[in-house]
Amino acid sequence: MRESVLVNYRKSQKGFSLLELLLVLGIVAALIVASFIGYPKVRDARYVDVEAKHIGQIYASVRNVYAGQPDYSGLATTAVAIPAQFFPDDMLSKKNTWGISSWGGYVVVDANDVSPSGLAASSFTISYSDVPDSVCKNSHTLPLHPVSTYQCFKPKGYKWQW
């Protein structure tokens, strides 16, 4: 008879014990903290991939427009790059006056006054502003064209030069 009383008592208990509830809350809290720590790295890696494609498109557009030209004189973001549609649509500001990167900074395309060859306007630069320090420090993750050079500069930015 005593066994049946214990069995009936256990069947009438409903819900979770305090220990079980605390364990679940601890696991949920650990997952939330881990997602906040890992999210910026994943986001920046995605942005680097997106910007690698953008740089390739901008590079190809500049080379196509200036094919057969002796240099890149006159190349400027507002004067040539925007009207010639060098920037992909998802990079344009609402007023179509500037290229905007995934990080929210400006993207500028200009001819170089002083080029590696020593000739004025014989190369061009794609500059990014407001690039996070984490991306700047991990420069091995940056997309580089075989003939380009890049430079990380302060405040937070990058320059690609061809």
Image (cartoon, grey):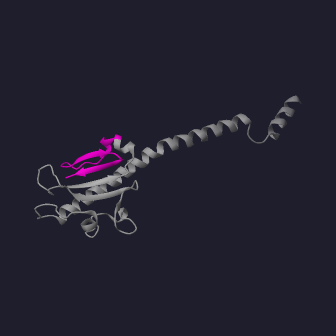
Q: Position of residue 114 (x, y in %)?
A: 16, 52
Q: Position of residue 51 (x, y in %)?
A: 33, 54
Considering only vertical position in the picture, is 20 above or below 102?
Answer: above
Magenta residues, start to end: 137-162
Q: Residue at x 84, y 32 (%)?
A: 6
Q: Position of residue 1 (x, y in %)?
A: 89, 30
Q: Residue at x 88, y 29 (%)?
A: 2
Q: Residue at x 30, y 63 (%)?
A: 87
Q: Is residue 131 left or right of residue 151?
A: right
Q: Is residue 26 left or right of residue 81?
A: right
* Count of numbered badges drawn on the protein: 0
Q: Name the residue nearer the viewer: 53 or 75.
A: 75
Considering only vertical position in the picture, is 2 above or below 31?
Answer: above
Q: Position of residue 39 (x, y in %)?
A: 47, 46
* Quadrant of the image occupied by residue 74: bottom left
Please check the rendered image and state whether residue 146 is part of the magenta-colored stretch, yes or no.
Answer: yes
* Quadrant of the image occupied by residue 153: top left
Q: Is residue 50 left or right of residue 2?
A: left
Residue furthest top as drawn = 2
Q: Name the residue nearer the viewer: 21 or 72.
A: 72
Q: Is residue 57 left or right of residue 12?
A: left
